[in-house]
Amino acid sequence: MWLRSMSKRVLILGDIFVIAITTLVGFATHGETDISFLPRMAVVFFPLVIAWFLLAPWLGLFRDEIIHNARQLWRPALTAFFAAPFAAVLRGFVLNAPIIPIFAIVLGAASALGMVVWRALYFLLNRKARDGR
C-alpha cells in the first residue's frame, strides 16, 4: 500500500505544496489570481520556501521522533512564525521595498495554520500505515 511508503520526500513535497497554497490563497484574498501576478507570487513563495527549509531542520521537523509525535505539532507553527518574517525580509530585499510587519504576521499565521493541518494529516496517514489499516 502506498501509505506504508510515505517518506520524508512526501513530507517535504507537502510542505512545499502548503507554502504554494498559502501563497495562492493570500493573493486570492486580494483578488490577484491572474497569471500576471505570478512574478509577485514567486517573490513571496520562494523566500518562504527558503526560510522554511533553513529553519525546519534546525527545529527538528524532519526527525522521526518529531514527525511521529502528535504532541510536537506546535513545532511547524513555531517554525512558520519564524520563517515568515525572514521571508518578508528576503522579499523586501528582492523587491527593494519596505518590509511591512503586518504582512509578516499574516503570512506567519496563514503558514502556521496550513503547516499544522498538513503535518497533522501526514501524522494520521503515517500512523494508519504503521498500524496496517
Image: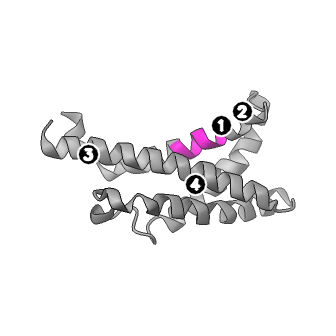
Label whose residue precedes the other's in the sequence (3 or 2): 2
In this picture, residue 113 sits left or right of residue 8? right
Placement of 95 over or under 121, stated as above or below: below
Label whose residue precedes the other's in the sequence (3 or 1): 1
Viewer-side label of 2, 4: 2
Based on the displayed image, in which of its 4 quarters is residue 84 positioned? bottom right
In the rendered image, the residue lying farthest to the front is 71
- Predominant SS along the magenta part: helix
Label whose residue precedes the other's in the sequence (2 or 4): 2
Q: Nearer the viewer, residue 75 or 5?
A: 75
Q: Amino acid at mark 3?
A: Asn
Q: Is residue 21 magenta?
A: yes
* Quarter placement of the C terminus: top left
Q: Is residue 76 magenta?
A: no
The answer to whether mark 2 and mark 1 are in CB contact below 8 A is yes
The answer to whether mark 3 and mark 2 are in CB contact below 8 A is no
Report how far apart the C-alphas of labels 2 and 4 lie in the structure.
19 Å
In this picture, residue 23 sits left or right of residue 17? right
The residue identified by callout 1 is: 24
Residue 107 shows in the view: yes
Residue 28 got which mark?
2
Give the residue drawn at x 21%, y 41%: 128
Circle 1 residues within 10 Å: few <14, some 14–19, many ≥20: some
Label whose residue precedes the other's in the sequence (1 or 4): 1
